[in-house]
Structures are given as C-alpha cells and as structure tokens.
Image (spheres, rainbow, N blue to C red):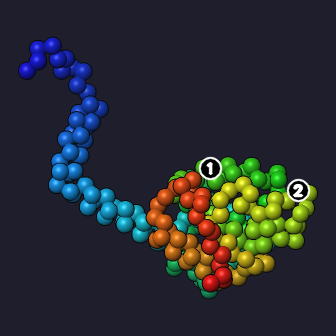
C-alpha cells in the first residue's frame, strides 16, 4: 500500500470509472463486448424502425391527408407510426406543405431539437418543389434547401396509402443504414415513393 495515497479523494465517479475500465478490459478479452454491441445494435435498429415517432406538424392541405392516415380506416399506428407533438420526443419530421422563407427558420429549429437518429419525409408537391407556388418570391423550392430529406412522397395531395408506403420505405432505409446520424448520411440518396 502506498502511504502517500489519499483515500478520501476516491469518490464515486472514480470508482465507477475504475470498475468500468476493468469490466471493459474483461469484456474485450472474452469477445463478449463485440457480441453485445452487435446484439444491442440490432435491437436498437429494430426498435427504431418499428416505432417511428412523427412530429405532428400540419402546414397546409396535406395535413388533412396526414390526419386521415391516423384514422381507423388507414390506421398508421398499426404500422408503428405514432404522432407526437414535441420535437424532443420525435424522430421523423413530416413536412407537408409549402415552406415560406419566414417559416424556414422555425423548421430548422424543430429539426435541430429532434434527437439523433432523425429522419425527414417531404410529403406533397409543395414540400418537394414549392408546388403551385414554384418560383414564388417567398416560398422555398423544396424543404431540402434547408434540411436533408430521406423520403419524398409526391402528389397533390398524396393519399394516406402513399404516406404509409413512405413510412415503409423509410423503414427499409433504416434497416439498410442502421442508426447513423443525419450528418453522416448526407451523401445517401433519398427515396422517392412510387419510383421503383
């Protein structure tokens, strides 16, 4: 024992660090850590794609189709699509209307408040290209000018079935890419629903 060591400075944080380091080395030596990381990665990927918490944001007429997808006739919850009202509890931003230059900053703020991994779906012609307001003085030519889009659902307005199909395409993308952050998948090609 070292007589100069001060045992009163051995607090709970250093105890947790010491136990963590010893446990980490033991798990590395037995290859259990690699097995657990693969198992945990697959579990989180499964839970992430089976429960898509979508931000409940209605901008214009496509919001009616978004609401229709949640009624018992189409029942989007059966496919794991749950609409939330807080960006901090959501992982999918569903943009469903034209984005004016004045509304661009709030959309970016909502996007930045969402936890990673997060995804964006552009629903309808207004969100994709500006729609009938194309090249207007105050409407952006698509939401992809301010935030990255993962799935495009064309139509004016797209049907609830197309929206549910868009969530299915997003699930396939999550299976393929895993739980990478939105900044790491900037080069990833977006999916267009109906474009087989």
User: What label sits on residue 122 in the rendered view?
Assistant: none
Secondary structure found at label 2: loop
Above or below residue 82? Residue 28 is above
Circle nearer the N terminus (1, 2): 1
Residue at 56% over, 72% down? 170
Q: Dot 1, crowdedness within 10 Å: few (<14), some or many (≥20)?
A: some
Q: Nearer the viewer, residue 28 or 151?
A: 28
Residue at 60% over, 58% down? 186
Residue beneath disc 2 = 138
Q: Dot 2, crowdedness within 10 Å: few (<14), some or many (≥20)?
A: some
Image quadrant occupied by the C terminus: bottom right
Q: Position of residue 188 (x, y in %)?
A: 58, 64
Left or right: residue 74 compared with residue 108: left
Q: Nearer the viewer, residue 47 or 193?
A: 193
Q: Position of residue 53 (x, y in %)?
A: 55, 65
Question: Whole-Å distance between the Cαs marked 1 and 2?
Answer: 23 Å
Above or below residue 123? Residue 105 is above
Above or below residue 196? Residue 108 is above
Q: Position of residue 118 (x, y in %)?
A: 56, 59
């Amino acid at each position: 024992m070292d007589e100069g060591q001060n045992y009163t400075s051995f607090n709970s944080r250093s105890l947790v660090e010491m136990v963590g380091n010893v446990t980490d080395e033991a798990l590395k030596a037995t290859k259990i850590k690699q097995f657990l990381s693969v198992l945990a990665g697959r579990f989180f990927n499964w839970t992430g794609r089976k429960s898509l918490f979508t931000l409940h944001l209605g901008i214009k007429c496509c919001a009616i189709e978004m609401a229709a997808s949640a009624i018992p006739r189409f029942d989007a919850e059966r496919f794991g699509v749950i609409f939330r009202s807080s960006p901090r509890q959501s992982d999918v931003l569903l943009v469903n209307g034209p984005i004016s230059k004045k509304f661009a900053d709030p959309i970016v703020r909502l996007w930045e408040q969402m936890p990673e991994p997060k995804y964006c779906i552009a629903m309808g012609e207004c969100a994709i290209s500006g729609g009938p307001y194309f090249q207007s003085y105050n409407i952006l030519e698509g939401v992809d000018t301010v935030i990255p889009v993962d799935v495009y659902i064309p139509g004016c307005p797209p049907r609830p079935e197309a929206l549910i199909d868009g969530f299915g395409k997003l699930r396939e993308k999550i299976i393929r890419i895993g739980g990478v952050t939105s900044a790491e998948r900037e080069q990833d090609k977006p999916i267009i629903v109906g474009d087989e």
